[in-house]
Each structure stands twice: as structure tokens, then as C-alpha cells.
Image: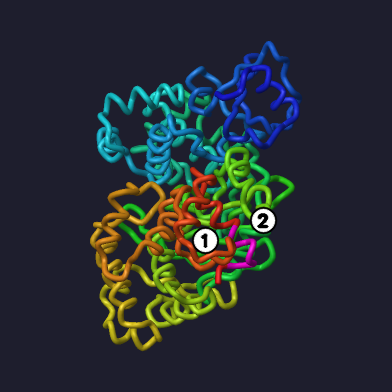
Amino acid sequence: MTLHDDAAYLALKTHDPRFDGRLYVGVTSTGIYCRPVCRVRTPLRRNCQFFANAASAEREGFRPCLRCRPELAPGLSLVDSSQVLAQHAARLIEQAARSGDDPYLPDIARRLGVTDRHLRRIFREAHGVTPIDYLATQRLLLAKQLLTDTDMPVTQVALASGHASLRRFNAAFAERYRLNPSALRRQAGATPRPREAAPSLRLAYRPPYDVAGVVAFLAQRAMPGVEQVDGLELRRTLGWMHQGAWHRGWLQCRFVPPRHELQLTLAPSLLPAVGAVMLRLRHALDLDADPSLIDPALASLPRPAPPGLRLPGSIDGFETAVRIILGQQVTVAAARTLARRLVAELGQPVETPFDGLDRLFPTATDIAAADPERIGKLGIVRQRVAALQALAREVAAGRIELQPNAALTPTLEALRALPGIGEWTLQLIAMRVLAWPDAFPATDIGVLNALGTRDVAAVQARAEAWRPWRAYAVMGLWQSLGDKP
């Protein structure tokens, strides 16, 4: 925990949302732990124990508050270089927990380039708990959210949260929370909904959040048939591979700035993958960013960036990579037109309750198998067709993984080996797909225009002041132009 206990207690007394997800308080008189934004009466200082994460609070025997709901808190943000490895390990564990997978710690260690023993040591030093305890907490908090916000049967909740059996789920729930899942659902006051109604879930973020900037960025790039932006509401179709099966549907989300939350409505057909979809949406809208770390690094931008600048990521990494390739050397509007044609030609139809939202973005298999001439007739030049299909073949075969927790250097090397993918494309994919906050496309025309130069070396030198958040600086530079040309 980076705060001393007195400072932590002040954050609790003032309900400071900047520390949401970075600070939890266990109240010894009740056995409950809360977020700092909890609106219950502030406990006495002598009854408070402070923790850096929910797993540490649960290890000490505290149960999650039913009012402020710790499972809604923003997730991890990279804090400093000494903790990056442990943070990446925690993210991989959280991804596994929300995907219903059973992570094998030696595999995670190899992926991060360290030994299993070293990973366990640094993980405990950074997070105060073992990886197994952290995994158990992530699974149970996801289950708690599903029990509260959906009417999924308890058996489905158990499977969706990564528990191997209902018996093990009930036992783990009773051990940690001292009540069974059905009892928690009753205590939480979950409201039954019509069987055909879509569940509504909540995701929190740390303020400030540049809602206007994110919405404008997405609106300028929204693909007809796949995406819609209406005020503070975002809608899109989605196909999701989960445990060997495709799930097709839609999602709708709305920013709720007064509560620092995103309200998510999900098609019932996507519920089996709900944990993984929520995690990817957090990345797509950069809900876990910590403005207190990022904003000071951007102070030297030519024009001040709005407080809480965010870096829009991707829900479907392959889709975003395809759209980046289509955007090579053309305007945002032209790239969107090409993407729309590709969707109309190769995308599968899907039913949604929204007029005009009726197509899925083509999968890697769809694009890899298509006749190159069929794609070329859409106005996509031959070199880009070759690049798209080379990328699609690698993704479809599982040789390239396009998602936030993919290993950065090997993924970039594999992409670099493909035809038609240069440094600009690599840096954009690193920014928006691989979630690398220090990616920097120095040759980008928007960056050059915003800095008033064509001297790439000078741009790179100037960007050193924005490390390790240069990708956010790119967003600030684009916003200063109104949009990327």
C-alpha cells in the first residue's frame, strides 16, 4: 500500500474515488471490507485495517461489503517499474479467472521470463498474498457480481467464475464469505428480471475520466452494422470464442459520470463468457487507468491534455489490428469505409434489438479463407490484402495472440515478420491491442502535425519526457488536432 494508514483513513473519510481499487479497508467490528468510496458511516480509526487489494483483506478473514461491492472496483494499473512483472502476473491470473480457465503458474512464469519460484516471491512482495489466494479472490468476486447482477443459475455462475464443480464452489464461498451463494443473492437484494431480459452489470473507473474524448474517438471510427455511438451510450455486436465454442450477440454500455461507472447490458447469449467480456471491455475503455500517474507525465504536451485522458483499446484484438492495417496511409474516414465494406462482404449476420446493428466483424478464419480478389474488389490495395490475410492466417492458427496480456516482444517480432506491417502499424497495435502504455508511432502524421514538424528524430527526442506513458501522449496530440488525419 502506497499510503500510510493516516492518509488511507483520510481517503476513507472523504470517500476519495482516486483510490478506488488501490485501497480497501477492513472493519474489525463488523468483519467486512469496503472500498474507500463506500457510503456507509465511516468506522472508527481503531477499527480499521488497510489493504492494497481485496485478496489481502480476504486472507485476513474479512468479507466483501454488499453495499459498495468490492468486485466493481477498478483493476490494477501499472505503478512503477519494480512492480511491473508482478502486475503482469496478476493480470494474467485475473484473465484466467474471468475466462473460466485454471492457470498453471509455471506457464505464467515462463511467459514472463522468470522462474516459478521467483514469480511467487515477487508476487507476494508486491501484492501481499500468494498467486493462489489472488486467483481465489478474483473468482469469488466475479461470482459475487454474477449472483448480484444476473439471475444465472448458481451452477452456471460456478462454471463462469472458473470453479471446477458446484460442490467446490459452494465450499469456497462458504469458507470465505460464511454463507452460501443463494443466501448472498438474497442478502444482496438481487431483483429478478424477465427471462428474456438482458442482465445489467456495473464497472467502475477512477476519476477523472475524459468521457467526451473517448466517446468522440469511438464515434469517429464507428463501423455501420457493427458499432453505434449515441451520446454517452456505446453499442456493438460481438462474437466471442469461449472454451471452444462461439458465442454471438451484442453489448450496450453507458457512461454514468456521477457514479464514476459504466453500466453494461449484455446479450444473454454472451453470458457464458461474461467474465472475459467484462475484462476486455475494461481494456477497451481503459477503465483501470490511474490518472494520478499519467496526467503529470503529460504536462509538457504542446496543448494541455484534458484531465483523465484515456487510451481506447480493443474488445476484439484481431478486429482492431485489421482496422489499423486498413488505416495505413489513409484518413480515418477512408479506413472506416474500407472496414465497412469488409464487414458487409465477409461479416456474418447477427440479431440485436438495435436498428442497423446486425453484422459481426469477420473472424480471422473468415478473412484467411477468402479469395484475395474478393477482398481486393472492395477497394483494398493488393499489398494490404496480403497483409490482412497473412495476419489472419497466423491468428487463426494460434501463432499470434492479439490481446492485452500477450507477450509484447515476441508478438511484435512475429508481426514484424509479416508482409505489409511496418513500424507505424506495430506501434498502433502495441498501443490499442497489446495495451503497451509507452508505444509511440513517431512517424504518425497526426503526431507530426500536432508537434509542427517533419523531423522524426526530434519528435522521438521530445517524446522522452512523456515516458512511460507515450501512448497517452499520442492520444493527447491527436485530440489537439480534433482527430488523427
Q: Earlier in the sequence, mark 2 or mark 1?
A: 1
Provide the residue span drawn in magenta.
477-483
At label 2, the amino acid type is Arg
The picture places residue 301, in percent across and down from the top left corner, at 62, 52
The picture places residue 328, in percent across and down from the top left corner, at 42, 72
Q: Do we see residue 270 in this rendering?
A: no
Using residue 476 as the reference point, say whether residue 443 is left or right of it. Answer: left
Helix, strand or loop: magenta stretch: helix
Give the number of the mark in front: 2 or 1: 2
At label 1, the amino acid type is Ala
Taking the spot 34% from the left edge, 65% from the top edge, the residue there is 422
Q: Can you tell which mark lies on residue 267? A: 1
Using residue 139 as the reference point, say whether residue 73 is left or right of it. Answer: right
What is the spatial separation of the Cα atoms under label 2 and label 1, in whole angstroms? 41 Å
Q: How many marks?
A: 2
Per the image, label 2 sits on a secondary structure element best described as loop
Corner quadrant of residue 369? bottom left
Name the image quarter holding the C terminus.
bottom right
The picture places residue 442, in percent across and down from the top left corner, at 46, 59
Q: Does 215 sit above or below residue 24?
A: below
Per the image, label 1 sits on a secondary structure element best described as loop
Name the image quarter holding the N terminus.
top right
Q: Does 450 sit above or below residue 139?
A: below
Taking the spot 43% from the left edge, 52% from the top edge, the residue there is 273
Mark 2 = which residue?
303
Structural crowding at the residue carrying mark 2, measured as other residues with C-alpha within 10 Å and reported as few (<14), some (14–19) or many (≥20):
some
